[in-house]
Image (cartoon, rainbow, N blue to C red):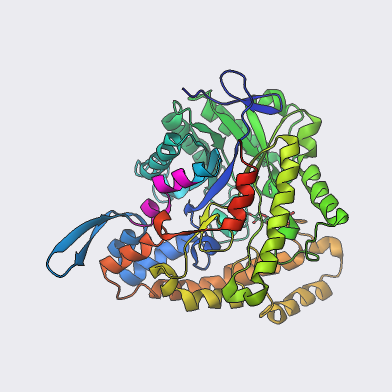
Amino acid sequence: MTSFLKVSGARIVDGNGQEVILRGAGLGGWMTMENFISGYPGCEFQIREVLADVIGKEKSQLFFDKVGSRYISLPSIILVKSLGQFLENFFGEADAAFFKSLGLNCIRIAISYRHFEDDLNPRVLKPEGFRHLDRVVAACAKYGIYTILDMHTAPGGQNGGWHSDHGSHLSSFWKHRDFQDRLVWLWTEIARHYKDEKWVAGYNPMNEPADPEHTGLTHFYDRVYAGIYSVDSNHILFLDGNTFASDFTGFPEDAGTRWPNAAYAIHDYSLYGFPKAPEPYVRAEEQRRRIHRSYQKKREWIDQRGLCVWNGEWGPVYARKEYDGDLTDEINERRYMVLNDQLEMYQQDRLSWSIWLYKDIGFQGMVYVPHETPYMKLFKDFLYKKYRLAVDAWGADDRFVRHVYQPIVDLIKKEVPDEADQRLYPYPIWTLERRVEVLARNILVSEFMVREWAEHFRGLSEADILGIAESFKFENCMERDGLNKVLRAHAPK
Ligand SMILES: O[C@@H]1[C@@H](O)[C@H](O[C@@H]2CO[C@@H](O[C@@H]3CO[C@@H](O)[C@H](O)[C@H]3O)[C@H](O)[C@H]2O)OC[C@H]1O
């Protein structure tokens, strides 16, 4: 019989006081879809709107979230096969069984407020939001996997990333009291729903906040803590640091007593896991020191106060044969070394972690949708175009378009020569170069490509659409063996 987990000092323990180290992955791209995970440009709300415009509301709904049926003609009979759609296919029992087979014990589920509340009908709970979440929480529980519910998108947007699904680089959440009130209300409802579920390890009220004032985040955590604990005092709260889970310096000194039963989330992405690494990773002493320094810096504030650290996101991205050619294997072997070396560090600290990402179309996931599936065939050329134009901000290789955007960076540097004035929040996570990438490519150019993505569905039959959604099903996916091998080696024995 499992028991609620809780935070005891710097550790997570079960009902018997035994330490539990949570080792697992993030289920991104599911109840919060993302451009590089599923292969569209821009934000989820944009593709949903435009797909409905191109093929009609009903058919677009069929792709995202409606159980349908497909007629398969065989020589003498007609079979009616019941099929799910994207949300149904993306994670099922087979995924949970595979995950467990690696020895991992926790999945952080990225959810979007949009599944539970409509902007045009605020504070009215959409019960259907729980349909899939309940299903996945139950599938994980069945295999002895804890879940952490992660609010990846907040009304108005809590950061300027595509992953908070609001289409702008400026986050309105921090400026509008009503957005904050709504999220506190929604979390209270979610906690009410899961208050008795022991396989839910806890709630991660906000992914990667980026509050320019810092004080707004403390205020929000106070309020969401009170809201959740008014209905559910059993679950751990996993609180991300400010500025993309990197900075705790604006947190209150009395955090430990103010928010009992809280763990503090860092996101420990290492530059060596990405195309923009300063040099190829060869496990040099200095490189390992650099990875360690960056990790220590993120957790310093938490350690100094004896609080509990959770690494809620981290992990390299990978090269792809179709884009990186003969260099692919060599690049990926280096990335697996980064992965391994990060895990060794975490092991030493008995750190709980959640690697990003469980499933995608082949860039970062432990499991990926292969080229032979209907979805990947349909979007093959379009995906190459996205790659060439580097429209996704995450791990993008900008070699084909750097010359287009560099002049914008140069212009700003020339016309705003004081470096301090070039450092707009969320500097240093967003340098001037990063800001130009996000605005010009990830927001602007992407916006013009959304319709092209949706046009791929025009004229498709319902059966075709269901087949496309089925591409994401575990049985149709491949496993990234190099990554899973390293994870398995560091999983609980
Ligand atoms: O949904 C996820 C999203 O949560 C994630 O956000 C990014 C995380 O990394 C941030 O940059 C890192 C900041 O710290 C430096 O040390 C690292 O080198 C950087 O990579 C980035 O700004 C966030 O957008 O990204 C992946 C999404 O799928």
Question: Could you tell me which quadrant the C terminus lies in?
Answer: top right
- What's the magenta region? 85-98
Query: Where on the image, by quarter, is ligand 1?
Result: bottom right
Is residue 88 covered in magenta?
yes
Left or right relative to 26: residue 209? right
Image location (x, y in percent) of residue 307? 73, 29
Left or right relative to 310: residue 419? right
Work out whether residue 366 can be spotted: yes
Q: How many marks?
A: 0
- Residue in the image at 37% along x and 58% along y: 64
The answer to which of 367 and 218 lies nearer the viewer is: 367
Q: Is residue 357 above or below residue 4?
A: below
**Extreme residue toward the top, this view:** 16
**Extreme residue toward the left, this view:** 76
Q: Quadrant of residue 247?
A: top right
The answer to which of 358 and 153 lies nearer the viewer is: 358
Work out whether residue 426 can be spotted: no
Image location (x, y in percent) of residue 2? 49, 24
